[in-house]
Image (cartoon, helix red, strand yellow):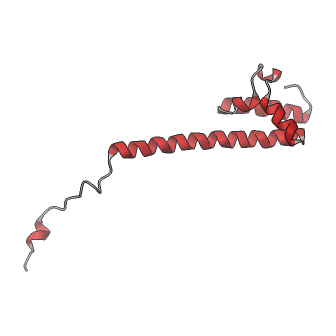
Amino acid sequence: MVIEEESMQPKQKSLEVMPNQACTAGKNQQTVELDQKLERLSRVAYISMLALDVWEDKDAAIAWLARPNQALNGQIPIVLCEAESGSKQVQRVLLALEWGSPA
């Protein structure tokens, strides 16, 4: 049996093929940031649709979302949707309005 010299050498990976940790870390950070943006967009979309259901008029729903609201301690509903906890507060107020109970 003849063993070729080439097969006895350890295989080496080219540096070009090996992932760069800085590059990989950047992609992970980009993925995290994209996920956060998608979550915010999802919250805004959900709250916008809920406001449209409650007000049954696009302009009225937009106006309600864009103005400070007493039930939200004077905060603007759409701005609160940046965070999940704020989105839940806005949802609570909208559902209270829909069902006719105090927020």
The quarter of the picture where residue 59 lies is top right
The x and y percentages for residue 56 are 90, 42
- Provide residue 47's location: percent of width, then percent of height: 76, 39
Q: Residue at x 67, y 30 (%)?
A: 85
56 left or right of 9 in image:
right
Q: Which of the 4 image quadrants contains residue 69?
A: top right
Q: Position of residue 57 (x, y in %)?
A: 89, 41
Residue 28 lies left or right of residue 71; in this view the side is left
Quarter occupied by the C terminus: top right
Give percent across and percent down for residue 43.
69, 39
Residue extending farthest to the right is: 100
Q: Residue at x 44, y 46 (%)?
A: 27
Q: Tell me the quarter of the image containing the N terminus.
A: bottom left
- The residue that appears at 81% across and 30% down in the rendered structure is 93
- At a point 9% along the width and 75% down the height, the residue shown is 3
Q: From what the image shows, is residue 66 above or below residue 53? A: above
Viewed as shown, does residue 74 lie left or right of 40? right
